[in-house]
Amino acid sequence: MLFCLSVKQTLSPINHVLPRSFSIKSRATVDMAASSLRVAAAQMTSINDLAANYATCSRLVKEAADAGAKLLCLPESFSFIGAKDGDSVKVAEPLDSPVMQQYCSLAREAGIWLSLGGFQEKGFDDAHLRNTHVIIDDSGIIRSTYSKIFLFDVNVPGGRVYKESSFTEAGKDIVAVDSPVGRLGLSVCYDLRFPELYQQLRFQHEAQILLVPAAFTKITGQAHWEILLRARAIETQCYVIAAAQAGKHNDKRESYGETLIIDPWGTIVGRLPDRLSTGITVADIDPSFIESVRTKIPIQQQRKPIDFWKSSCR
């Protein structure tokens, strides 16, 4: 665990959105105020200005804390999105850097846990970084980190070619960590397309809440973002919190937006009214609902071991 220095900031609120009530046939009526834990997911449009992005994040943190959230999730590249290729590598820093210290201070001063969706952590040499998901507790201590495993090397139909592996060092470790709202399973953006990661987080690492911070492209987001997130929630029977970058960052890059919180039944319980706005959405995590869904559809007990699939291919 890493300790970060204190940095004082003046915080100002912005609007947030409380989710409307919801129900499904398999769910009994419960006292949400008594049995639930509040989380928030943020949406923003990061640019190539560390100070401006920090000011936006500060407002979002204050808003989430005022709404009673115990955890706020910020999107991938929350602190910086470069205007041109190579900019992100130039700003990459170790986790004990002044930039990360500021965010540790935010968590401590607001008394809230933070999920920092994708920090440009310095890599093994000056030409590489790690796309690192950082979890900070309400004392400003880094509790866990996860480096993105699946890198975005894609020729987007009708869009540009991306080659994240040219400047990013891929992670190798699956990471889950306990928090006041439940056990968190960590991932970043393009990881979403690889369900085996989330299966491991649920069944091997006992995750209850899957975090999917992202900066999905506009084209792929329109086609796949919501359906993939709901699929991950349904097939793992976990809550999914997906904090998203939104809108135009510069002349070359635009993100889809649509920050979502989804329950283990696949119901969207948190969503900003504007897909491209800056703000937060909040929702309540109900541990008893997780157990109810898992008991009624007991997929953990019904799964087949890897040896079954190996033998079936003969």
Image: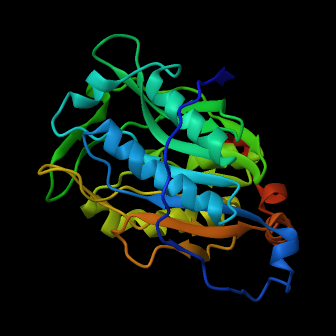
Q: Nearer the viewer, residue 230 or 113?
A: 113
Q: Nearer the viewer, residue 29 or 140?
A: 140
Q: Nearer the viewer, residue 4 or 211?
A: 4
At a point 52% along the width and 42% down the height, the residue shown is 116
Location of the N terminus (image quadrant): top right
Quadrant of the image occupied by residue 174: top right
Q: Nearer the viewer, residue 234 or 284?
A: 284
At a point 20% along the width and 27% down the height, the residue shown is 86
Tell me if I can see residue 204 in this picture.
no
- Name the spot of residue 209 as percent of width and height, x first: 68, 54
- Name the spot of residue 293 as percent of width and height, x first: 79, 71
Q: Is residue 305 above or below residue 44?
A: above
At a point 64% along the width and 42% down the height, the residue shown is 109
Quadrant of the image occupied by residue 19: bottom right
Q: Is residue 17 above or below residue 81?
A: below
Give the colouring mode of the picture.
rainbow
Tell me if I can see residue 171 in this picture.
yes
Location of the C terminus (image quadrant): top right
At a point 51% along the width and 65% down the height, the residue shown is 280
- Name the spot of residue 53 as percent of width and height, x first: 36, 45
Tally of marks: 0
- Name the spot of residue 265 as percent of width and height, x first: 68, 73
Left or right, 140 with reference to 250: right
Residue found farthest to the top: 125
